[in-house]
Amino acid sequence: MDPVYLRSAGTSLLISFDSGEAEVIHWGADLGTGLPDLGILAGPLGHSSVDARVPAGLLPQASSSWRGRPALRGHRITGEGSGFDFSARLRVTSAAAEGGTAVIEQSDADAGLRVSSRLTLHDGGLLELRHTVTNDGSTPFQVDELATVLPVSPDAVELLDLTGRWCRERHPQRHRIQQGTWVRSGRHGRTGHDSSLIFAAGTEGFGNRHGRVWATHLAWSGNHEQFADTIGDGRTMIGGSELLGPAEVVLEQGASFTTPALFAAYSDHGLDGITEAFYSWFRSRPHHVLPAASTGLPAGKPRPVVLNTWEAVYFNHNLDTLIELADSAADLGVERFVLDDGWFRGRRDDHAGLGDWYVDGTVWPDGLTPLIEAVTSRGMEFGLWVEPEMVNLDSDVAREHPDWIVGPSATAHKDGGRLPLEWRHQHVIDLVNPDAWQYIFDRISALLAGNNISYLKWDQNRDLTEHGHAGRPSVHAQTLAAYRLFDELRKAHPGVEIESCSSGGARVDLGILERTDRIWASDCNDALERQTIQRWTGLVVPPELVGSHIGPTTSHTTARTHDLSFRAITALFGHFGMEWDVRGVQGKERDELRRVVGLYKEHRDLIHSGLPVHTDTADEAFQLYGVVAPGPVDSGTAAVFAFASMRTSASEAPGRMGLPGLDAERSYRVEAVFPSPADADYAHTFTQVQPPAWLAGGAVANGRFLAEVGLPMPILNPEHALLLKVTAL
């Protein structure tokens, strides 16, 4: 059987069938044309080992003497008990490739199991892989795990993954790859604040713009594991799997289970190359919010400037106050006004009301219509906060349907069964129960049908601990039911955009992003924290999908105080907005805020379609990053960069820093555009007797000079930033 060989955008995937199973010979740099006889890759056999060469299978299995994690774990249940057919011997029965997609079938007739693998190498170099196992036997088969994995090169010696907590999501951690298995388990019932958005293995010291990197992401919003697995002969696999509870997936005869997609990218120029592959895939989707011009798809509307009311009024909903806030927002150029938590029945704080998705008549005697009309008459869209997957015990729906509350007991709340501990005074509504699912669908659909709502901020404010349906674990089924809820609501109301918010950034993955139009990266609007959160969220998720707001002068979550310019520049590199009572912003500060809104509108098309670039800075006190216009027509014609001082430095001055990603032969003008001498924050930003020579009038140089020699950066006070505009001459 001929090998499968896929190539795209500098990446190639080679799969051989010489061993009888599908073996991934290579995933990484493009191998070009004219492959040799793959028999030359047969390696030696060592002492005290199996008397055959052990393949690095597309589905690693113990039957081939793979000593690492097997891809498929499970067993057959018969009248004699369980545990049968625990070790499948899957062998290839067919393989076909067309364009960038290959489908490979493997089966074990004796075990009654068949696995179909579908691999697509997308145009931008992003690989998408998923497996489907089918039970061809006559008795049930319990699936304990079905993992998607890929091998990495022997010179991948360092591993980078991400971790975090509430208000500090997606922070990097690195360590040496050593023999054994590094596992990151997510048992939150959702993706989790500490979930690693990406698993990246790379060459020694790989960075933003240098080194070879192999990276994977598991597109799943429930329990999961991501791992790197290095066996004794030095081979390393990276991948992930859904983390299944006991008997969550039991296949009857003829039934199938499909894994979440594993997305994988290779780069020979550091992490920015990984990001380019993911962004290319996102922006090529027909339903993407803002397709890149190079896709040939019709351009989407620009991402609107948002004002969210949470940190402006919290639960204190009052029509007159909110209309004043809408007036102030419209004056600043806001284009979408979002009413946050507190509008529905009984919701005066976070102890009650979840599940009762009716407008509270005591606060809104005429419904939401007066506010919606006030907002839309001022040229803004109206958005609304909801949390459809959750319920308070103090709610009419919980009192009327206690059996709809998720718990570990088959009797649940209805008969006094034990419930999970409360989290933010709330529980989870059982979407696996068809009556509960239908109620939630009907209520949210009725809200959308009865009101001029353009946008839903969809929250999910707790982990799904001890999550069960009818006494059995059900995170798998709940996640699929939530996906179906998103899908059906979008089908019924195709013009409504949805944001995925989950206590901030606890549900950020490509599974939820296939159903939503943006994510809320974190409940923390502190600009210093957001610099790191957004940088690592942006490793995978493009900025047009990442909500990024200017918060109040003193942060709600950290009590830090920052100048407007630092908060604004941080927020510009995302889907920009404000979460702030802007009625109190007056004088020079209001002029500055209005100018920031204008800067976002001027540059958002570039920021939301361009290629990301991150300078490798020797001093971690500084960050220099930006967006360069994409190709093929506009490549390198414009860019915007942010230079940020994160903390005090051991050096007296930052020194020269390169501006990467520009066309080497073009000439450019580099200008500092914000803050400028007329802005209120200008004097606070700098701490220098004399600025760099170029700062006053700009600098002119070609792209090669700017990348290799760079420009001397100004001395900034800690926790300040400067916005740079780059224009081709």
Image (cartoon, helix red, strand yellow):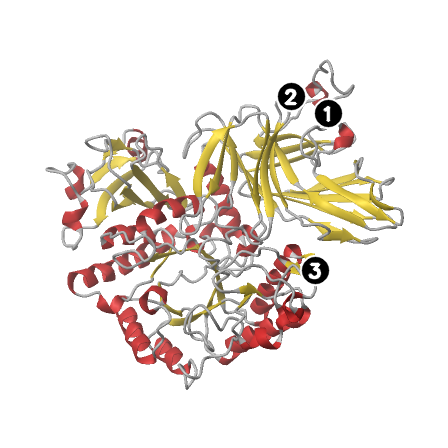
> Given the image, on which type of amino acid does mark 3 rest?
Gly
**Which quadrant would residue 697 be assigned to in this image?**
top left
Whether residue 162 sits left or right of residue 98 in the image: it is left
The mark lying in front, picked from 3 and 1, is 3
Label 1 neighbour load within 10 Å: few <14, some 14-19, many 20+: many
Q: Amino acid at mark 1?
A: Val
Three-letter amino acid code of the residue under disc 2: Asp
Q: CA distance from mark 2 to mark 3?
A: 44 Å
| Residue 122, percent from left and from top | 58, 44
Quarter of the image holding residue 130? top right
Residue 225 x, y percent position in the rendering = 60, 43
Secondary structure at badge 1 equals loop
Which element carries disc 2, helix, strand or loop? loop
Q: Could you give the CA–CA distance between mark 1 and mark 2, rounded to whole angstroms?
A: 10 Å
* Looking at the image, residue 365 lies above or below residue 211: below
Query: Which label's residue is closer to the chain start, 1 or 2?
Result: 1
Question: Which of the two discs, 2 and 3, labels the residue nearer the N terminus?
Answer: 2
Q: Which residue is mark 3?
A: 471
Front residue of 123 and 472 = 472
Mark number, residue 233: 2
Query: Is label 1 in contact with label 2 (beta carbons under 8 Å)?
Result: yes
Q: Quadrant of the C terminus?
A: top left
Q: Residue at x 30, y 44 (%)?
A: 641
Of marks 1 and 2, the one in the foreground: 2
Q: Residue furthest bottom?
A: 366
Q: Which residue is mark 1?
A: 54
**Front residue (pair 582, 311):** 311
